[in-house]
Amino acid sequence: MNRLRKLIIATATVLLAGASVSISPHVSHAESHKEDRYHHLEEHLNFKYPLHIMFGVIMTLKKEHKGYLPLSEAIDIVHSMKKVEVMDSYLDFRRNKVNSREIRRIVKQVYDIDLDRVSELGAGKQVGTYPKEITDGVKLELADESIEDLDAYIQSLTKVEVMDLYLEHYGKKIDGPEIRRVVNQIFGVNLDGISSLEGSGVALFSKDQWISKYDKDLFVVHTGLTDVDVWVYPTVYFTEQTGLTELPAGLQNALKGLGFEYNQEKDALYYANPTGESVPDQFKGHTLGTIIGFIKSNHANLLKPNPDKEDHESIDVD
């Protein structure tokens, strides 16, 4: 790490150490100016996550290492961590005291997934498929309101509004696993599963945005706006490396065994849930598992830094 970068990081650390980690919907002029300085610093740093996320995770790591952890080593550790680990470490720094709005901001900054946009589009899990636990929690939070038909009222709420009401009912402290469970139940976004896609060779486009995407991804799993249907096709990178413009026969056969069929309009293998409801997590898991298993058995070399070089060693993409 060169001297300039050390100086910038040290300055950022001092600034953040004196800053409140709470996020207020009303930002003062002084706070706004301080945020501008953070953004200016971030432009000079090649960090994987925003400055305050890096700071919080590094503070958690220092606590775990009894305070002895060189800053450059801590940065390398953060960059090597899975997204789910980064999220949990940051929440540990916050002592799991985060509100609904802050949670959506953290998900955006760690995963680059915009839950507010999912809500605006009415995308993801269908409103009628909320688990009873979620609707019961929302009903209890609305118990003092004069609402004649609570079920119909909840059906009319956006996903963000459901999340806000449920977490108000839940309480002020909520840890990472619980947050991810609630996000999946309301938005149909499986953050645990998404975290495992990095390095797997599978890109995921869902809720009208890229949920997971990396340069060496080989295949795309693309779901419709409400997760009722899903289709699979090769990436440009896969075509460049193999010359194939469609899915390999072995992968096609494996997916057809799950119920996929070729769809001429989409020029991809396609599946639509015959019930008209969102595809269940189990089916998504089987689909992703089938594709990742095929990659590990047949194309793991394409995930390596230099795929053109002959290398028969296996790699773990879990």
Image (spheres, grey):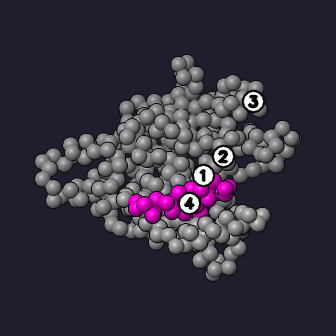
User: Residue 275 colored magenta?
Assistant: no
Q: Mark 1 or mark 3, which has the lower sequence index?
A: 1
Q: Quadrant of residue 63?
A: bottom right
Q: Mark 4 or mark 2, which has the lower sequence index?
A: 4
Q: Determine the secondary structure under disc 3.
A: helix
Q: Which residue is mark 4?
A: 37
Q: Amino acid at mark 1?
A: Ser
> What distance separates the C-alpha of mark 1 from that of mark 2?
7 Å
Rendered location of residue 5, percent (x, y): 72, 63
Look at discs 1 and 3 and give the one toward the viewer: 3
- The answer to whether residue 179 of the structure is visible from this angle is no
User: Residue 32 colored magenta?
Assistant: yes
The disc label shown at residue 196, or none:
1
Q: Determine the secondary structure under disc 4.
A: helix
Residue drawn at (35%, 68%) of the image: 172
Labelled pair 1, 2 in contact (Cβ < 8 Å): yes
> What distance separates the C-alpha of mark 4 from that of mark 2?
36 Å
Residue drawn at (69%, 70%) of the image: 71
Rendered location of residue 220, percent (x, y): 60, 35
Q: Amino acid at mark 2?
A: Ser
How packed mark 4 is, by other alpha carbons closer than 10 Å (few <14, some 14-19, many 20 or more), is few
Q: Mark 4 or mark 3, which has the lower sequence index?
A: 4
Q: Determine the secondary structure under disc 1.
A: loop
Q: Is residue 113 above or below residue 237?
A: below
The segment highlighted magenta reads 27-54
Rendered location of residue 1, percent (x, y): 77, 64
Look at discs 3 and 2 and give the one toward the viewer: 3
Q: Which residue is mark 2?
A: 200
How packed mark 1 is, by other alpha carbons closer than 10 Å (few <14, some 14-19, many 20 or more), is some
The disc label shown at residue 240, or none:
3
